[in-house]
Image: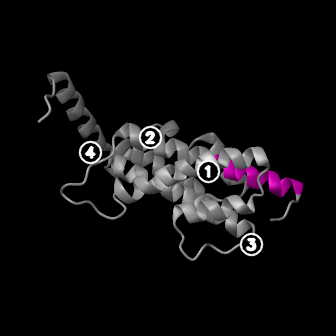
Amino acid sequence: MRYVSWKEAIAECLVTAIRDQLADPRIRATLPQDMLVPAPAVVTLASQLNYPKVVDAWRDAQRELVTNSTGALRAACVLLETVCKHVLSECGEAVPSTPTLPNLYKAAERELKMNNDEKTLATGLRSVVDGIAHGRSHLSNAHGAGPQDLAPSTTHAELAVTASGALAVHFMRLLSERSRTGKKG
């Protein structure tokens, strides 16, 4: 058993109380507007491309970060899946028969016709995608939770949501540039 100082115990109690309060829809409705609005880059690009489901997925991920780290991991995955499905739809391509995040990401990446430098960077980003997919399957609430399952730390969940937001913005920017230049997949 790990020793917990009185300061850590108080901090854990406060965080738990805040999460419990924020889980109540009546309390969430009283949050300041800047906490309810998604990151401007996600909103701007999703609005330009007319992707309201992407904005909704980002809002879900942000809300879950405040209230539920396991749900935030699931929401990070959903955000990327949503963006990839929009990219595929925009390019006139079908969703893969096994629509896992890694498969969706690879299919969308292919359609965006990246240059060599972008492909090199994308190779590393696939590791991030695999990590987010792994977190969804093994640490989130996507498949339920058993009594022995560990919950991810808030820091872990924040990393997954931040990374998924950055990847979502990157894909939407590539798609927006492609639409502006008239390139077809």
What residue does disc 1 label? 168
Residue pointed to by mark 4: 20
139, 178: nearer the viewer: 139
- Which region is colored magenta? 167-181
Amino acid, disc 2: Glu
Q: Answer few, some or many: residues within 10 Å of disc 2's Cα (few below 14, many 20 plus, some between 14 and 19).
A: many
Residue 59 lies left or right of residue 89; in this view the side is left
Query: Percent from the top left, x then y, of residue 179?
Result: 82, 57
Give me the disc on residue 158: 2
Q: Is residue 180 highlighted in magenta?
A: yes
Which numbered disc, 1 or 3, marks the residue that appears first in the sequence?
A: 3
Amino acid type at circle 3 is Gly
Specify whether residue 74 is in view.
no
In which quarter of the view is residue 51 placed?
bottom right
Q: How far apart, in angstroms, are the residues tagged by discs 3 and 4?
A: 43 Å
Tell me, yes or no, if residue 97 can be seen here. Answer: yes
The rendered magenta stretch, by its main secondary structure, is classed as helix
Please state, as top left, top right, bottom left or bottom right, where the C terminus lies in the image.
bottom right
Secondary-structure class at tag 4: helix
User: Disc 4 and disc 1: Cα gap in Å?
Assistant: 29 Å
At 58% from the left and 41% from the top, the residue drawn is: 39
> Reading the chain from its start, which is encountered first: label 3 or label 4?
4
Whole-percent x, y for residue 142 in the image: 37, 62
Of the numbered discs 2 and 3, the one sitting upstream in the chain is 3
User: Label 1 neighbourhood size at 10 Å, few (<14), some (14-19), many (20+)?
Assistant: many
